[in-house]
Image: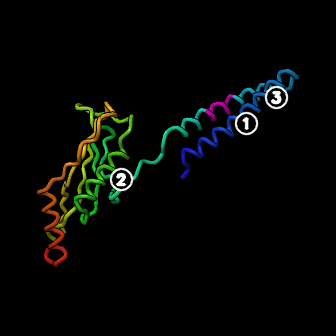
Amino acid sequence: MISTADFLTYTQWMAIATVICAVLTGLGFALQWGIRFRLVGITGFMGVLVVGLFGLSVVPFTHPLIPGSTKYSLVYDNGGNQLVIAVAPEITETALKATLQQALGAFSSYGRLGGANGSLVVRARTIIHPEPGVSRPLFLGEVERSLMSRTTPDSEPKINQRNFQVLQRAIAQASNGVQ
């Protein structure tokens, strides 16, 4: 993946090319070349590309990796204040906390609407199978972040202990072969 430092390098080279093209455009007007108006369009377009590349060099594309987080998949996202991620049933409490923080960092953006309380809530769930042919979603925890003020710290992930115990019993039954 292209990094922000790469985009900064591309911005510098594109800016140099734009200046050269602007000099050619000025020379075209001075010497009454037939393509002088095309050169104006080319120079303007190159200027737009420089601004775009500079914008890409300022905004980071990757989010910091939280140590201990595990893989998750996005199950539900309303584009505003709620999203749900799915985690593996074998997840531990510490890994769940780290994974919730990772998802919160990955999906918090300035474009989200915070709803009534102005915050983003990330919930984690997994699927258990209490009996053959039956699947049941089990919510394991959640974390919340204010979208109005980026200076406030994230809240501590809240783990649903009762559901986590149900999950541990289901894993233990599955490993014993009991359904």
**Residue at x 24% of width, y 64% of height:** 89
Residue 84 lies, in percent from the top left, at 27, 49
Q: Are marks 2 and 3 in contact (CB under 8 Å)?
A: no
What residue would you read off at disc 1?
A: 17
Check disc 3 and report the residue beneath it: 35
Callout 3, which amino acid? Ile
* Quadrant of the drawing holding the C terminus: bottom left
| Relative to 35, residue 68 above or below | below
Q: Which residues are magenta?
A: 44-50
Q: Nearer the viewer, residue 101 or 108?
A: 101
The residue at the point 25 percent across, 58 percent down is 94
Q: Nearer the viewer, residue 108 or 129?
A: 108
Callout 2: helix, strand or loop? loop
Q: In the image, what residue type sits under mark 2?
A: Ile
For marks 2 and 3, give the one nearer the viewer: 2
Q: CA distance from mark 2 to mark 1?
A: 40 Å
> Looking at numbered disc 1 in the image, what kind of residue is underneath it?
Ala
The answer to which quarter of the image holds residue 9 is top right
Q: What residue occupies the far right of the structure in this picture?
A: 31
Mark 2 or 1: in front is: 2
Nearer to us in this view, 73 or 69:
69
Dot 1 falls on a residue whose secondary structure is: helix
The crowd level at tag 3 (other Cα within 10 Å; few <14, some 14-19, many 20+) is few
Q: Which residue is mark 2?
A: 66
